[in-house]
Amino acid sequence: MSGTANSSTSSPRPRVIGPRWRAGLPGRSDSPRRATRSRSNEPAIRGGRTDPEDDVTGRVTKQAQLRTALTTLCAQLRPGEMLPSERQLCDDYRVSRMTVREVLGQLETEGVITRIPGKGTFVAERVARSRLHMASFSDDMRRLGRTPSTVVLHTDYAVPPPASINALGTSAGDKAFHLVRLRLADGLPISIDDGWYRADLLPGLLDHDLTKSLYSLLEQQYDCPIDRADQTVRAVAADERGAGWLGTDVGSPLLAFDRMSYSRDRCIEHAQSWYRADRYQVYMTVSAGD
């Protein structure tokens, strides 16, 4: 079920992009040039004075061109690869340092790049940004153009903890299926799912291929489609076990979901999920009166 979210991992290895990144991009000349002003790039002069409106228009146009070029470049590179320096961008695009910093600031805010003082500017980890809605992790990742995969970490048939007994509505002492899985997108760890499931409604659940979509399995094999869920989300710090599974540092920020999933008004799943906050975001639309 999708909740549907920078932790500091090891510093990205500086990998400077060579001349290939400049090919075909606007503002680039293949021949050496001196820092002279091009007449075509000078602001319009009216009555012997510079028109302020033309200054602004020219800067906005160059800013848009630089933003388009850098966005395209970042999409072609791998996370952690280094971008050219501010000075290099100024030279190649014939723009001011202020324009370069404005564009880099925008891209950093949007999560496209990461700037590390004293080291440089790097392509950021690609973040899965998901709308808050009902969907399985697998369906959600495919919708975002990512390739989902799953590693089963633990299975068991045991008595659940009190919170799960209350959520599932089972009696004390009744056993349930316990399933812990690591969820990945494009081979990168995104989340850990730790769930308890009603054994009386889902007999033989652990005998199936649990690396596939669990919600599809519940619907197709047990006629128990998930049609509603109650969940909360909060920020937590990664503990040693979670950090190891997710490939991040202890204390790194995670999004923690606590979810009760229903099929025809019967709670059949109580699960907790922890998402890497640097690789997953959740957003929602809120209307007046909600």
Image (cartoon, grey):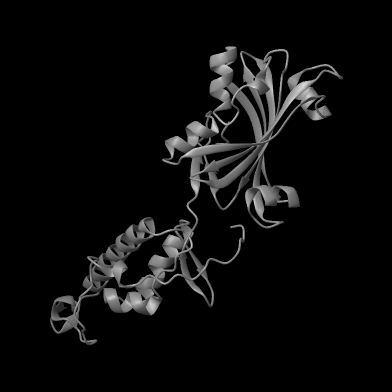
Looking at the image, is 39 positioned above or below residue 165? below
The spot of residue 37 in percent (x, y) is 20, 84
Q: Is residue 227 visible?
A: no
In the rendered image, residue 250, in percent from the top left (x then y), is placed at 71, 56
At 38% from the left and 66% from the top, the residue drawn is 103
Give the percent coordinates (x, y) of residue 47.
Answer: 13, 81
Compared to residue 162, the image places residue 201 above or below, namely above
- Looking at the image, which is closer to me, 273 or 19? 19
What is the quadrant of residue 155 in the picture?
top right
Q: Is residue 197 visible?
A: yes
185 to 122, vertically: above or below:
above
Q: Is residue 61 left or right of residue 38?
A: right
Q: Is residue 261 left or right of residue 48?
A: right
Relative to the observer, which residue lies in front, 255 or 58?
255
In this rendering, position of residue 109 left or right of residue 76? right
Residue 194, above or below 58: above
Quarter residue 200 falls in: top right
Q: Identify the residue at horizontal 49%, vertical 35% (top origin).
A: 140
Quadrant assignment for the N terminus: top right
In the picture, residue 19 is in which quadrant? bottom left
* Number of numbered markers: 0
Horizontal and vertical percent position of residue 177: 73, 23
- Which quarter of the figure is the C terminus placed in? top right
Left or right, 151 with respect to 48, comes to right
